[in-house]
Image (spheres, rainbow, N blue to C red):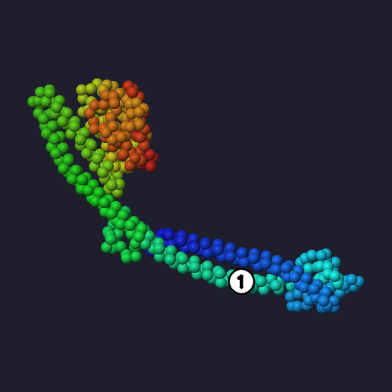
Amino acid sequence: MSQSGQSGLRAKLGVAFILQAAAISCGTVLGVYGAAAVLEDVLMKRALREETAHYVELLQREPMHPTPDTHNMKGFLQRPGETDDVVPKELRGLALGFHVLRKDRSRALAYVSDAKPGRLYLLIDQAHIGQLALFFGLVPLTLVLLFIYLATWLTYRLSRRAISPVIWLANEVRSWDPKNPDFSALAPDRVPPDIEGETLSLSEAIYGFGKRIGEFVERERNFTRDASHELRTPLTVIKMASEVLISDGQLDDYAMRNAQRIARSANEMEVLIEAFLLMAREADQALPADDFAVNTVVRDEIERAEALVVGKPVRLELVERAQFCLHAPSKVVAVLIGNLIRNAAAYTDAGFVRVTVEPGVVTVQDTGVGMSAEDLKQIFQPFFRAQHGRRGGHGVGLTIVKRLSDRFRWPIDYQSEPGQGTTVRVHFPDWAQIKCV
């Protein structure tokens, strides 16, 4: 069993039983000692009263009957007219009632009462009686504690056996490789025979769920592999054919506009496919990070977006107030910034789309139709389009931006007003930036 398994359920169960046994033991010991003390006091006082009454009866029948004199009890009778010398010094002058006398290490309980023949003093050895009471209390106490410890140990063994299937299941799951978990270890034919009940149901559920997850992952990998090849190939053919038509020079204006439209749509589809494939990758299979200047990526994306504003009184502007570099997948930054620029171009019918590069921040500002506060709450919803003047597009550009931002932890904030345009800022934290060479 692994170290974490040792400090898991079994360790907690053992600590719980130890604490339980300790608490019961302490309670039992305190109870026995308390009961012994109470009984010692109550029984000795009662014994002294009964001895006094019995001795008085004897005196009534035989006035010269000797006082009690046993190993544990002694009596003294001071008849009327006798001096105090007939009683020990420590008893002289005691008032009626009970008194505790201490001498050296001994402890005695004295009871003073008036009898018809005189004043009677009964003295009982409290220490010796207490030792007897304690001794006879320790014997059952020891037996009780032994029974408690035996019962606790047996219960602990049974509890360990009861949770062993859960610990086995936890250890199996813990030993899996997160990148390639071996769900077959929980297959029904490989589960130990002592796994039953709720643990067996849990094992079967994890096995079934893991099997489905594995199938989903395999389908995703197959899709990204096939899509990367099967979609890009015809798209490349479309781009090349449209470029040939545009460069031919024999098309009329109508055919030229359609050929340019085909070329723009092919470029948009290429970017869209690239973004989808990028997000479909698992985190540990993402594109490798490289060192690059963000300004260069921004310039390339502005150049690619120029085709979107052809025929519109819209200027694409780049303002470089600083230059900063990142250690990150450059393709991801290109997709994120490119989607923001294309989205701004689609919203803007006149004016400008200005991209500003500042230290750690890229701002995309447009003079388009803008968005209302209600639209801003939904801009990251898939296939959402603002209700005022959005033309073209697939409604997924900002969704892609949001998912990439969350995945790589690059915060984004939006500001927009209807009729005034939209401003988007992408913040690249300091930990992602590097010194430009």
Point out the image quarter for the N terminus: bottom left
Q: Residue at image x 34%, y 63%?
A: 195
Name the spot of residue 114 as percent of width and height, x first: 83, 68
Q: Is residue 311 left or right of residue 191?
A: left
Quarter where residue 306 is shown = top left
Seen at 76% across and 66% down, the residue is 100
Location of residue 203 by image quarter: bottom left
Task: Please indicate whether residue 83 sits to the left or right of residue 130 in the image.
Answer: right
Given the current orientation, which residue lies at the most extreme right position?
A: 81
Q: Amino acid at mark 1?
A: Leu
Q: Residue 125: x percent and y percent?
A: 74, 72
Q: Is residue 186 above or below residue 102?
A: above
Q: Residue at x 20, y 35 (%)?
A: 269
Q: Is residue 27 left or right of residue 209?
A: right
Residue 167: quarter of image: bottom left
Which quadrant of the figure contains the C terminus?
top left
Which residue is at a point 77% across and 65% down the rendered structure image? 98
* Front residue (pair 376, 431): 376
